[in-house]
Image (cartoon, helix red, strand yellow):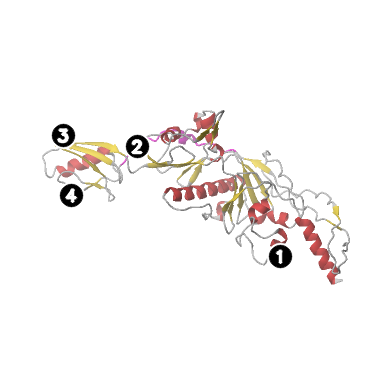
């Protein structure tokens, strides 16, 4: 009798693993899921008759058992639109300040032979004429001129000095990805995003005999400033000419335009190997998270360890982000319910971002911001490594304070 029930349990697990893949729920809903509402009543399960080989050589059919009923909450699609802070659309009023690498032309008025070009050194000092070194790091051009006049005044009677900025070597913006001339560009003064993209030759295109295809994925393009994602809608800016997205750049801004030819799913968060998974039709949430060489669903149920997840992974609040980064469509699903057969697997699309949290979310908008910032921070770090000559591959761990959720 004991052997009979063991066989029945194995058969039921096998039926659960063959549960048909369904498309995810509507991603266009705009209502945030409520954690206080009771779960809706589950639909009646379809009765199936599993078959398996008996211990004897003659095949035998096990007694019919109903399939596992779906008791997990249905995933709710939510669309959240991010808006730009109007301050980002105003040019900075701060004066240019000097830093290492900036090139200057300096001359003592009335003495043309003293004209010289010099650069601010790594120590923040400039070396001119008879002076041993004048610290100008963080000074404006006028302040640097006054400092030089004060120092020279100890050697020359009332000197008047002219200081001009020739080259900028201390302020840069990063423009990487599918632009025609990716690289690191100087930021001499006020510059908009469109002007910086123009320096890089614009976004890349592929020309054919009949049409020109855009190689840039504008919906996943982004700007990172001080480690934070700025919700610039590149599609509206470059396709519709919407100047409300044309922000002013600041030093060390990171602009990345991904390729529209990339066919990947991104798996991030509390997983042992955050990575980009090549998309293969059809692809589901389970296959993307576990990977092609990962354990099968029935094996995951019997494992003593956590499989591909970190030990603090919170699998009942796995997020799937789809579409534009500035107006993402998100679905939060119970991964445990899926692998245990209590809910249907979710079909994915190229470009989807999967995020496994290490604690439950309490505010959906903050949760979405966390996912987006993790994605752009990971991609920016890897692309920066590549630009600097390193290898780089999606999988950089990003530590996040759980209380921020």
* Magenta-colored span: 81-97
Q: Magenta: predominant secondary structure element?
A: loop
Coordinates of residue 329 in the picture (x, y in percent): 63, 41
User: Which label was assigned to residue 302?
Assistant: 1
**Which numbered disc, 4 or 1, marks the residue that appears first in the sequence?**
4
What whole-number distance in Å separates the C-alpha atoms at marks 4 and 1?
A: 73 Å
Which residue in the structure is indicated by mark 4? 132
What whole-number distance in Å separates the C-alpha atoms at marks 3 and 2?
A: 25 Å
User: Which label was assigned to residue 109?
Assistant: 3
What is the secondary structure assignment of the residue under circle 3?
loop
What whole-number distance in Å separates the C-alpha atoms at marks 3 and 1?
A: 84 Å
Seen in the picture, residue 268 relative to 240 is either above or below; the reply is: below
Seen in the picture, residue 336 relative to 262 is either above or below; the reply is: below
What is the secondary structure assignment of the residue under circle 2?
loop
What is the secondary structure assignment of the residue under circle 4?
loop
**Which numbered disc, 4 or 3, marks the residue that appears first in the sequence?**
3
Coordinates of residue 243 in the picture (x, y in percent): 49, 29
Tell me what residue is drawn at x 51 percent, y 48 percent. 379
**Which numbered disc, 3 or 1, marks the residue that appears first in the sequence?**
3
What whole-number distance in Å separates the C-alpha atoms at marks 1 and 2?
A: 60 Å
Which residue in the structure is indicated by mark 2? 188
Count of residue discs? 4
Seen in the picture, residue 4 relative to 172 is either above or below; the reply is: below
Question: Could you tell me if the residues under marks 1 and 2 are in contact, i.e. CB atoms within 8 Å?
Answer: no
- Tell me the crowding category of disc 1: few under 14, some 14 to 19, or many 20 or more residues within 10 angstroms, Cα based: few
Label 3 vs label 1, nearer the camera: 1
**Which numbered disc, 1 or 2, marks the residue that appears first in the sequence?**
2
Q: Is residue 204 left or right of residue 191?
A: right
């Amino acid at each position: 009798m004991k052997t009979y029930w063991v066989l029945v349990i194995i058969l039921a697990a096998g039926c659960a693993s063959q549960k048909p893949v369904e498309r995810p729920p509507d991603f266009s809903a705009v209502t945030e899921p409520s954690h206080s509402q009771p779960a809706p009543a589950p639909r009646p399960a379809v009765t199936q008759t599993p078959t398996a080989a008996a211990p004897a050589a003659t095949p035998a059919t096990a007694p019919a058992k109903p399939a596992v009923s779906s008791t997990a909450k249905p995933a709710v699609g939510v669309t959240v639109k991010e808006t730009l802070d109007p301050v980002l659309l105003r040019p900075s009023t701060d004066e240019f300040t000097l830093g290492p690498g900036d090139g200057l032309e300096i001359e003592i008025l009335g003495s043309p032979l003293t004209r010289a070009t010099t650069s601010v050194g790594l120590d923040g000092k400039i070396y001119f004429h008879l002076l041993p070194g004048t610290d100008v790091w963080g000074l404006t051009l006028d302040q640097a001129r006054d400092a030089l006049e004060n120092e020279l005044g100890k050697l020359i009677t009332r000197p008047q000095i002219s200081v001009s900025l020739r080259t900028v070597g201390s302020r840069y913006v990063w423009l990487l990805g599918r632009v025609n001339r990716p690289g690191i560009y100087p930021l001499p003064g006020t510059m908009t995003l469109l002007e910086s993209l123009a320096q890089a030759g614009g976004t890349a295109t592929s020309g054919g005999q009949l049409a020109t295809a855009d190689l840039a994925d504008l919906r996943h393009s982004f700007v990172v400033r001080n480690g934070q994602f700025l919700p610039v809608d590149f599609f509206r800016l470059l396709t519709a000419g919407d100047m409300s997205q044309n922000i002013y750049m600041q030093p060390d801004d990171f602009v990345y335009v991904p390729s529209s030819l990339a066919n990947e799913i991104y798996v991030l968060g509390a997983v042992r190997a955050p990575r980009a998974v090549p998309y293969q039709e059809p692809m589901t949430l389970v296959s993307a998270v576990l990977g092609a060489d990962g354990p099968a669903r029935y094996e995951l149920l019997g494992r003593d360890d956590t499989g591909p997840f970190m030990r603090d992974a919170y699998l009942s609040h796995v997020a799937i982000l789809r579409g534009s980064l500035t107006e993402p469509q998100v679905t939060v699903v119970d991964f445990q319910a899926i692998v245990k057969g209590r809910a249907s697997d979710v079909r994915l699309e190229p470009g989807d971002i999967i995020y496994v949290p290490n604690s439950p979310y309490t505010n959906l908008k903050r949760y979405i911001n966390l996912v987006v910032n993790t994605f752009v921070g990971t991609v920016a770090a890897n692309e920066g490594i590549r630009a600097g000559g390193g290898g780089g591959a999606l999988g950089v761990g990003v530590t996040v304070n759980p209380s921020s959720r």
